[in-house]
Image (tube, rainbow, N blue to C red):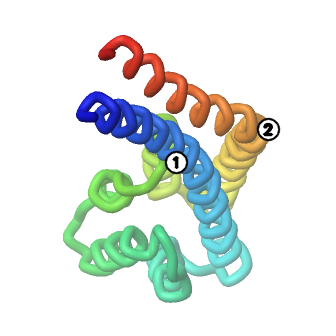
Amino acid sequence: MNKLIGAVLVISSCSMLGFYFSSELKTRIDNLKELKKLLILLRGDIEFANTPLPEAVQTLSKRHDGTYKEFLENISKQLLDLKGESFASIWKKGVKEYLMHTSLVKEDYALLNQLGDSIGYLDKTMQINTLDLYLEQIDRTISELSESVKERTHLYNSLGIMGGIFITIILL
């Protein structure tokens, strides 16, 4: 009886692990889409409203209710405090503190940090061009993930179940 209970627990936990990884992939796509929307709004504020970057981030933090709200509020607060820190350091600190709970991966964090490095000290035209470049990179990543999400989801789920069965057979 104990072996049967153990086998069921191993198979179900491995299956749940596979379902977790497939869910994380879908959540990553959603997080990237949300980030894309935010950056489009930021770009619009900078380009059409001629809003300086700190005020544009502040406006965006007030209008947004989602995964990135706390991140934007923190950056906005630090930018308006005028403690002499560069935008890049505030941005990197915010990414490290407030975005680690998201489903983004190392490559996404690296691109976000590069965006913070490039956008903080440039003039309006260069900020817009930098945002456009980053939006293209996000689009490319989203399209690549969207193309492979069905196969990868199926793979993660199958590997979880089969891995659980394999471990159970070895243990029995």
Say which mark, if any, is on residue 162: none
Density class for disc 2 (Cα within 10 Å; few <14, some 14-19, many ≥20) is: few
The spot of residue 79 in percent (x, y) is 33, 73
Check disc 2 and report its element: helix, strand or loop.
helix
Residue that carries the numbered disc 1 in the rendered image = 24
Return the residue nearer the eye: 92 or 161.
161
Return the disc, 1 or 2, that comes first in the chain's sequence: 1
Residue at the extreme front of the image, as rendered: 1
Looking at the picture, which amino acid does disc 2 mark?
Glu
Residue at 46% of width from left, 69% of height from top? Answer: 68
Return the residue nearer the eye: 16 or 151.
16
Residue at 61% of width from left, 71% of height from top? Answer: 42
Which quadrant is home to the C terminus?
A: top left
Location of residue 46 (image quadrant): bottom right
Q: Is residue 167 above or below residue 117?
A: above
How far apart, in angstroms, are the residues tagged by discs 1 and 2? 16 Å
Return the residue nearer the eye: 49 or 95.
95
Say which mark, if any, is on residue 147: 2
